[in-house]
Amino acid sequence: MDSLSQIVLGAATFALVKDKEIGKKALLYGAILGTIPDLDVLLNSFFDPIQQLAIHRAFSHSIFFSLLLSLLFAKWFSHKYKTPYLSWFWASFLALFTHPLLDICTTYGTRILYPLSTSFYSLDNVFVIDPLYTIWLLIGCIILLFMKNQNSKRALVIKGSLALSTAYLVFGLVTNLYVRHHFKKELERQQIAYTQLKIVPTPFNTILWQGIVKTTEGFYFADYSLFDSKKTLSFHYEKNNVSFLESKQKIEALAPFFNFTEGYALAREEGGKMMIYGTKFGPIAIKNGQAEFFFPVIFNEDGSYTLVQKQPDNYSELLEKLFLRLKGN
């Protein structure tokens, strides 16, 4: 999730335990703890883009990291404030561990059991940036900053902001299941055999969703809005160069990339070069009958390769199309 969301979530969860004892300082401590797991990005400059995929959201996002750091911070807090250790542990653990828990809700996913498992886990119930999740926590933290520490309603503000933001995540999860069920019915009706199905939210909302459907020979893509009056799905198909893909999956250096794609890797030729895309976020757009994606690995004739993150140059146009599609067909 984005940094602001993690900051206000960490602040609110730490304050849930410690606001009555230390007041506004709890917001500061929680904001710092909620940010710590993402400090693994400071290592990026030492590694190439593919290696970075092996580092980000790995040990710093695991439950074991949260437990270890909570034990250390609790010791420091209890020594500083001369109060019981256990409550400081729970405050620290909540602020730290809710960070990877929130990341699990995104399509990027996180490796919460690292190093026991290097797999990414994701619920796909919220986009990596969603104002309707963040706003409740942000408002709550701002109100707490202006309220006096002795105000008896501070606890109500903390619990209310956490309840509303969590309710939004639950809404996204329920909606994901509903859209998944709709996709399954449509795939059965259209007699499309598939091996994997992933339903993901589109940017900044939980109304418009994309389905990524993997078959033995390619991928089908479609979107669905909760406001759609026409329930029939129109699928776009992309053929996968399976033999090329399988040959590259044997390259050990590319293992972090394929682990990151979670099985949703698409190989195809473009402009005389072979590309492998991670399609789990769904298409950016479909132009001239071809889907565009983030995160292609580009293969050169000499056998070298490079991971590139595509940056569209028409964000305003894409957002306008997104909003129009969100309103339904």
Image (spheres, rainbow, N blue to C red):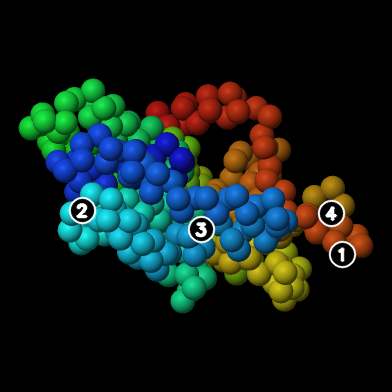
Residue 57, numbered label: 3
Q: Quadrant of residue 313?
A: top right
Residue 273, numbered label: 4
Q: Are marks 2 and 3 in contact (CB under 8 Å)?
A: no
Q: CA distance from mark 2 to mark 3?
A: 34 Å
Compare residues 155 and 253 and report the one nearer the observer: 155
Q: Are marks 2 and 1 in contact (CB under 8 Å)?
A: no
Q: Within 10 Å of the Cα at label 3, are there few (<14), some (14-19), or many (20+) other Cα atoms? A: many
Point out residue 214 in the picture as x, y percentages from the top left corner.
55, 62
Eye-nearest disc, 4 or 2: 2
Amino acid on which disc 3 is placed? Arg
Q: CA distance from mark 1 to mark 4?
A: 11 Å
Point out residue 96 in the picture as x, y percentages from the top left corner.
36, 54
Q: Of marks 4 and 3, which one's residue comes earlier in the chain?
A: 3
Q: Of marks 1 and 3, which one's residue comes earlier in the chain?
A: 3
Amino acid on which disc 4 is placed? Lys
Element under label 4? strand
Point out residue 220 in the picture as x, y percentages from the top left corner.
56, 55
| Residue that badge 2 annotates | 82
Quadrant containing the C terminus in the rendered view: top left
Element under label 2? loop
